[in-house]
Amino acid sequence: MKIEFCIETETAAKAAQKFGADRIELCQSLDKDGLTPSQDLIKRCKSVYHGEIHIMVRPREGNFIYSNEEIIQMKKEIKLAHQLNLNGVVFGLLLKNGELDTLQSKKLHNYAKSFKLETTFHRAFDNCKNPKNAFNKLIEIGFDRLLTSGQKEKAINGIELIKELKLISKNEIEIMAGSGVDEKNASAFSLINLDAVHFSIHNKDVKESSTKYINEKKISAIMEKLS
């Protein structure tokens, strides 16, 4: 099982390197559920972390229904990921009716693939009205990975849906659990042969300059459970 750290700072990137994270999802503004990181932040994190780097492609906070202008901006951010030699991009698009935006998702996926970038559909999926139908569409499009909490606030509470999706996937797409993954429940995802888990490594409301900013106890405990 791969371990992905969700981070937003250079300090966290250093921690990902220290603890040997398989992959990082790099965002800006995690308090807004993650936005596209700046070029400067990407470069600083890339200089200290040498594993897989996937960036969030989300131009604004709020819903996942994007205008044509926003789609153009997302394409620019995907191109930036390529120009900076990153491994992948993370995005999610929905329609007003709560269904997957298949057309635009496919366009962005294909654009990313033209640069040989991996694609992860993020937790916009957890707002989909028909998750199994949406999941099959993601497989048809060719997404490499789905990040999901099983349509619950915490992934452990959505583990039954996650388990079903794993069976449906037939290993055609990776499934990664995210939201509330900790040392108490991490092993539950291993028991269902999930591909990866995703979690934040920051201590909330602690400044980056503090030695307590990175939750090393949580990291060590999860990695021990999954070793």
Image: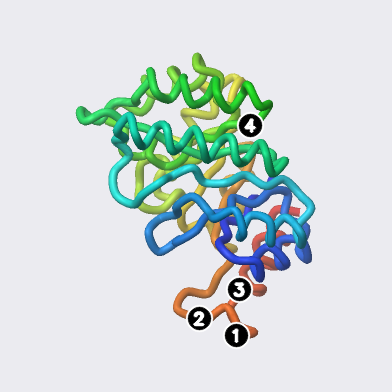
Comparing 175 with 212, the one in front is 212
Dot 4 crowding, Cα within 10 Å, few <14, some 14–19, many 20+: some
The correct choice, above or below, for 142 with respect to 195 in the image is above
Give whichever of discs 3 and 1 has the lower sequence position.
Answer: 1
Q: Which mark is residue 118?
A: 4
Counting from the top left corner in percent of width and height, residue 198 is at 57, 51
Q: Do the residues labelled 2 and 1 touch (CB within 8 Å)?
A: yes
Can you tell which quarter of the image residue 130 is in?
top left
The correct choice, above or below, for 178 with respect to 128 in the image is below
Q: How far apart are marks 1 and 4 (CA)?
A: 34 Å
Comparing 12 with 201, the one in front is 12
Q: Which mark is residue 95?
A: none
- Name the residue beneath numbered marker 1: 210
The kind of residue tagged 1 is Ser
Q: Do the residues labelled 4 and 2 touch (CB within 8 Å)?
A: no
The kind of residue tagged 4 is Glu
Q: Distance between the residues labelled 3 and 2?
A: 10 Å
